[in-house]
Amino acid sequence: MRLPSQARFDFRVSRFAVLAFALAVVAVGAGCEDKHVGRPCDLGIASDAGAGSVATITSPALQCPSRICLLPGAEKDPKGTTSLCTAGCESNSDCEDAELGTNDPSDHRCKTGFVCMWPTTVGNFCCQRYCVCRDFVTEPTGGFKPPKACEAPSTCVNVH
């Protein structure tokens, strides 16, 4: 039995349409990776051990897609905000889709948004830019500038 050629054409077209749609869905989903910046995470140390003016970074932090948990050095009182998942960034726009907290005192997520900056100039993460909660830092007019310690030549292994 032989089907008319028109039927084969429609079958091929519909199969192509389904395949094209599936590829489009995968491409859109891949371009919108959620890094879960702002998700609370465990530093693996006592909760008060990293408080103060020194940033504490832990990796691997398994609850973070980037595997990096950050408690920034506090320039101001973070009012209950805790260590949070972070990710590398190039500009503040890379941090805009971060998870934000509510005014509920039991919610320890960032309340005021995130900024792209250099949280540390020492250790394995020195001179790398990460999304940092504004609850901890005051952004200067014109944005954060690279720290002098991050200019070449530098003792940071990340500066070339």
Image (cartoon, grey):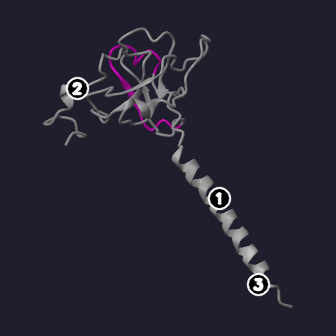
Task: Pick whichever, 59 or 95, lies toward us.
Answer: 95
Question: Disc 3 designates what residue?
Answer: 5
Residue type, numbered disc 3: Ser
Element at badge 1?
helix
In the rendering, at what x and y percent does residue 5 appear? 76, 84
Is residue 54 a member of the stretch shown in magenta?
Answer: yes
The span picked out in magenta is: 46-62
Q: Circles 1 and 2: CB distance less than 8 Å?
A: no
- Compared across the picture, whether 139 is left or right of 107 comes to left
Give amino acid for label 2. Pro
In the structure shown, which secondary structural element does the residue marked by tag 2 occupy?
loop
Identify the residue at the far front of this view. 6
Q: Looking at the image, which is closer to me, 62 or 112?
A: 112
- The disc, 2 or 3, on the residue closer to the chain's N-terminal end is 3
What is the magenta segment's predominant secondary structure?
Answer: loop
Nearer the observer, disc 1 or disc 2?
1
The answer to whether residue 86 is seen in the rendering is no
Q: Which mark is residue 22?
A: 1
* Badge 1: residue crowd in 10 Å (few <14, some 14–19, many ≥20): few
Amino acid type, mark 1 = Ala
Farthest residue to the left: give it.
153
In the rendered view, does 12 fall on the left or right side of 63?
Answer: right
Q: Position of residue 43 (x, y in %)?
A: 46, 27
Determine if the magenta segment contains residue 100: no
Left or right: 52 in relation to 149: right
Which quadrant: the N terminus? bottom right
Q: Which quadrant of the figure contains the C terminus?
A: top left
Foreground label between 3 and 1: 3
Instruction: Give the label on residue 147, or none.
Output: 2
**Residue in view at x 51 percent, y 12 percent:** 80
Helix, strand or loop status at disc 3 = helix
